[in-house]
Image: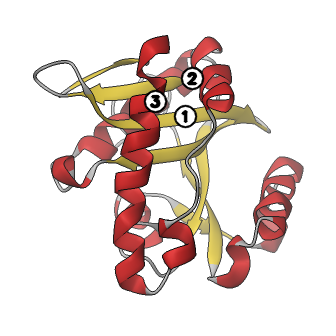
Amino acid sequence: MRIRPAAPGELPALQDVERAAGAPFRDLGMAEIADDDPPALDELERYRAAGRCWVAADERDRPVAYVTAEPVDGALHVEQVSVHPRAARRGVGRALLAHAAGHAREQGLTALTLTTFADVPWNAPYYARLGFRTLTGPDLTPGLRRIRAEEAAHGLDRWPRVCMRLELRQGDGTLGGLS
């Protein structure tokens, strides 16, 4: 699996990855999440043009996963990481997060942050295994509070959500110190 910047012509394929990655939520009684529209092409292009949209490409150089991120309060906030089910459970998500962590370090950012569903096995429990810690009220930065408010307005708080943070060690080429 090769991690590289997304190409402009691949953005519709990223929407397809998002749709496929969302389908398993249906089995958890979260049909609204499974049916949610993927990010719009102009939104994906904004991340791509800013150099913060990366794909994991298969042996034919086709995207099977992607991550988008943006700086928020001194950290690189992972806005979305999606892995097509056919590429799941192979370390692809971890590789994308490690790539984002490397980018964050290059930019002088000290952590990765994200928001996620607390009780979905491939969400908060997965990120905790990678070293992310759940943030509580006093730990939330203004930017994370804004993101959570936007998520609540979008209806995501129907299911428990958390903010998480992974401190990055400078000079370490791994995900927060994990290999």
User: Left or right: where does residue 96 sit relative to residue 136?
Assistant: left
**Which mark sits nearer the N-terminus, 1 or 2?**
2
User: Left or right: where does residue 169 sit relative to residue 36?
Assistant: left
The N terminus lies in quadrant: top left
| Distance between mark 1 and mark 2 Cα atoms | 6 Å
Image-quadrant location for residue 43: top right
- On residue 12, which mark appears? 3
- On residue 68, which mark appears? 1
**Which mark sits nearer the N-terminus, 3 or 2?**
3
Label 2 crowd bin: few (<14), some (14–19), many (20+), radius 10 Å:
many
Q: Nearer the viewer, mark 3 or mark 1?
A: 3
User: Left or right: where does residue 20 sit relative to residue 107?
Assistant: left
Q: How many marks?
A: 3
Tag 1: amino acid: Thr
Image-quadrant location for residue 77: top right
Residue at (84% x, 47% y) in the render: 143
* Residue in front for this viewpoint, 11 or 51: 11
Tag 3: amino acid: Pro
Q: Say whether marks 1 and 2 touch (CB < 8 Å).
A: yes
7 relative to 143, above or below: above
| Distance between mark 3 and mark 1 Cα atoms | 14 Å
**Mark 2 lies on residue:** 52
